[in-house]
């Protein structure tokens, strides 16, 4: 049936996307993702419960193993919430800093242009 075929296609596309995002989870938790990739993953887990769960589970396993070795007491549920808040805050800070930088750069270009033009007419 035609409609079933379409549905399968959409489903496959979605699963492929999630697979792509899941490959980002470990680098994300290790702080190895680029700014853009961080944003993509944070955006995706906002809307995809499955990947959010995957991210939380991976965090629990990674962090739990580390702390078992060090013998630290832990409450991983709370810590995960903090990790996500920090990651979002970092992403926002960098995004804003970039915006400010690009505005500043644009101003410098305009300023230089005005100086150059003024120089032509002196
Ligand atoms: Zn997903």
Image (cartoon, helix red, strand yellow):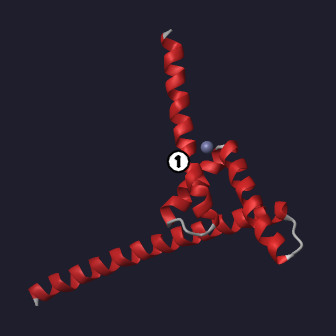
The residue sitting at 51% across, 14% down in the picture is 3
Q: Position of residue 44 (x, y in %)?
A: 59, 49
The reply, left or right, for residue 13 in relation to residue 120 is right
Q: Secondary structure at mark 1?
A: helix
Instruction: Report the number of discs.
Output: 1
Up the image or down, 83 lies above or below 107; here it is above
Q: Which residue in the structure is indicated by mark 1? A: 20
**Quarter of the figure with residue 93:** bottom right
Up the image or down, 3 lies above or below 49; here it is above
Q: Nearer the viewer, residue 70 or 81?
A: 70
**Quarter of the figure with residue 78:** bottom right
Considering every residue shown, the one lying at the far top of the view is 1
Considering every residue shown, the one lying at the far bottom of the view is 122
Q: Nearer the viewer, residue 119 or 107?
A: 107
Q: Residues within 10 Å of mark 1 (few under 14, many from 20)?
A: few
Up the image or down, 97 lies above or below 16; here it is below
Q: Nearer the viewer, residue 92 or 122?
A: 92
The residue sitting at 66% across, 47% down in the picture is 51
The residue sitting at 11% across, 91% down in the picture is 122
Ligand 1 near label 1 (Cβ, under 8 Å)? no
Q: Position of residue 58 (x, y in %)?
A: 71, 56
Q: Position of residue 66 (x, y in %)?
A: 76, 70
């Amino acid at each position: 049936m035609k409609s079933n075929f379409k549905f399968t296609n959409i489903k496959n596309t979605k699963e492929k996307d999630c697979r792509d995002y899941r490959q980002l989870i470990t680098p994300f938790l290790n702080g190895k993702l680029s700014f853009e990739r961080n944003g993509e993953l944070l955006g995706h887990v906002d809307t995809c419960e499955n990947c959010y769960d995957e991210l939380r589970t991976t965090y629990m396993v990674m962090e739990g193993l580390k702390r078992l070795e060090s013998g630290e007491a832990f409450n991983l549920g709370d810590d995960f919430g903090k990790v996500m808040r920090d990651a979002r805050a970092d992403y926002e800070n960098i995004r804003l800093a970039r915006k400010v930088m690009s505005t500043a750069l644009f101003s410098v270009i305009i300023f230089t242009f005005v100086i150059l033009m003024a120089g032509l007419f002196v």
